[in-house]
Amino acid sequence: MLLRTVRVHRHDLFRTADRQRFQHSFPRRPASSMSTRSVKNDNNAFIDPELHVQHSGGGPLTGLRFAAKDLFDVSGHITGYGQPTWRSTHDPAKHTSQAVQALLDAGADLAGKTHLDELAYSLNGENIHYGTPVNPACPDRIPGGSSSGSAVATADGSVDIGLGSDTGGSVRVPASYCGLLGVRPTHGRVTLQHACTLARSYDTCGWFARNAEVLRQVGDVLLDPASRQEQPLQRWLTAADAFKQCDKATGQAIYESLQGHLAEVKGLLGEPQEVTVASLEGVGSLSDWWQVFRITQAAEIWEELGDWITTSKPDLGPGTKERFHMASQLQPDEIQAARKKRQKISVHLENLLGSDGVLMLPTAPGPAPFLRTPPAELDLFRSRLLSLTCIAGLGGLPQVSLPIAKVNGCPVGLSLISPKGSDERLLQVTEKLMQILKH
């Protein structure tokens, strides 16, 4: 059961017709309608705090502001992708990202573009070229990445919504570290047209909010209605092996947050059932799953960016440089073997969740690591972290991180994973669960 488990171890496009049906009532102005209004940048969240684009319509997000990770195109501006050489070798965008435009059409104002890890290939939020955005929840710790700037801008109140991308955890991890709500949607349910690509079969467009209602409203705007799944989520599964990956203090903090409201949580999700996620014969533990993720993701990254890396020879920072080198050395046979295992894992997760399951697990092994943590120590933490975040990625599943607990005064997130296409249901459950846990 959940209580025993935690105590012990503790770029697909929208269909045009659907988009038009949803947005037909929003009068539009082009994204180039600029304003001189700017935001403060005390925490180094923004790469261009002077950039501001007024909303192009009226809708459910009227009156709200958002920030966009600097891998989403804004017409007339260079998309920097967290790397100076990338910025210097690319022209200003000719189009605005569809995700950015959808938020503008729904009434939100773009307050600026935000920092990210170099080429989005890290989960730390530290960028050797542009610095590290300050984690407002714990300034002596990293903010998490790669959507670091969007998380920080949301956490410090500069914006209401932070638009990011999540490939291996790049929204979920900073959400946990900065004490935010953050969602990785079902793969392909939010368009990534006119955004930089990292690993196509893993990349998703995610977002942050401080408020669960706002998180859901953004989903109503961005999620492709054609692939919506309506089945209620009422089968509560607790990932025993995932809780074993987190620190004892983190598991205990999550347990204590849920314990005081257990009857209400059961009323929402049903009786908890303990499961071992990585129970698939021939694939191994969650640590083995993360190796499958590491190889398949890296292969796609090198396919996407290898030619540019080889030709442009950018000055890559520590960690990122080594990961690109690893990606360049992968052999076809190990890639093929990992992809076969990934397919088995995906089918296994689909069977585990069915149409009504919701899987509960810690978002990260613990609170954010301290700034200037030695690289070897960070690598060990990263392995445990990716053992948790790889689950949703391997299955193409939606996942929400909820800021329900703290360890040593710093946030730790609880995650919920649900079946493909159930994003709207998951966001509704998140809103109700946050209401329960706040009482």
Image: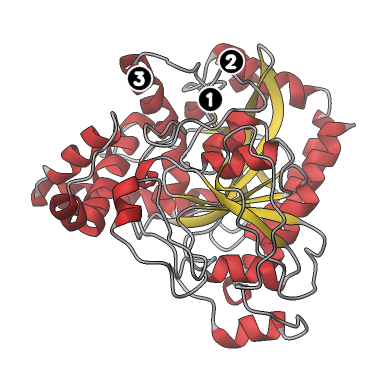
Q: Amino acid at mark 2?
A: Arg
Category of crowding for the residue at label 3, using alpha-carbon neighbours closer than 10 angstroms: few (below 14), some (14–19), many (at least 20)? few
Disc 1 element = helix
221 shown above or below 29: above
Disc 2 element = loop
The label nearer to you, 3 versus 1, is: 3
Q: Quadrant of the N terminus?
A: top right
In the image shown, does 366 or 259 lie closer to the viewer?
366
Residue 386 appears left or right of 132: left
Q: Quadrant of the C terminus?
A: top right
Disc 3 element = helix
Residue appearing at x 66%, y 24% in the figure: 411
| Earlier residue among tags 3 and 1 | 1
| Earlier residue among tags 3 and 2 | 2
Q: Amino acid at mark 3?
A: Leu
In space, the residues marked 3 and 1 are separated at their CA atoms by 17 Å
* Residue 243, label in figure: 1
Residue placed under numbered mark 2 in the picture:
10
64 shown above or below 253: below
Category of crowding for the residue at label 1, using alpha-carbon neighbours closer than 10 angstroms: few (below 14), some (14–19), many (at least 20)? many
- Classify residue 435 by image quadrant: top right
Category of crowding for the residue at label 2, using alpha-carbon neighbours closer than 10 angstroms: few (below 14), some (14–19), many (at least 20)? some
In space, the residues marked 1 and 2 are separated at their CA atoms by 7 Å
- Classify residue 380 by image quadrant: top left
Indicate the position of residue 360 as horizontal and vertical percent values. 61, 37
Residue placed under numbered mark 3 in the picture:
380
- Classify residue 105 by image quadrant: bottom right
Asked if the residues shown at circle 1 and circle 2 are in contact, with their CB atoms under 8 angstroms apart, the answer is yes
Residue appearing at x 29%, y 33% in the figure: 317
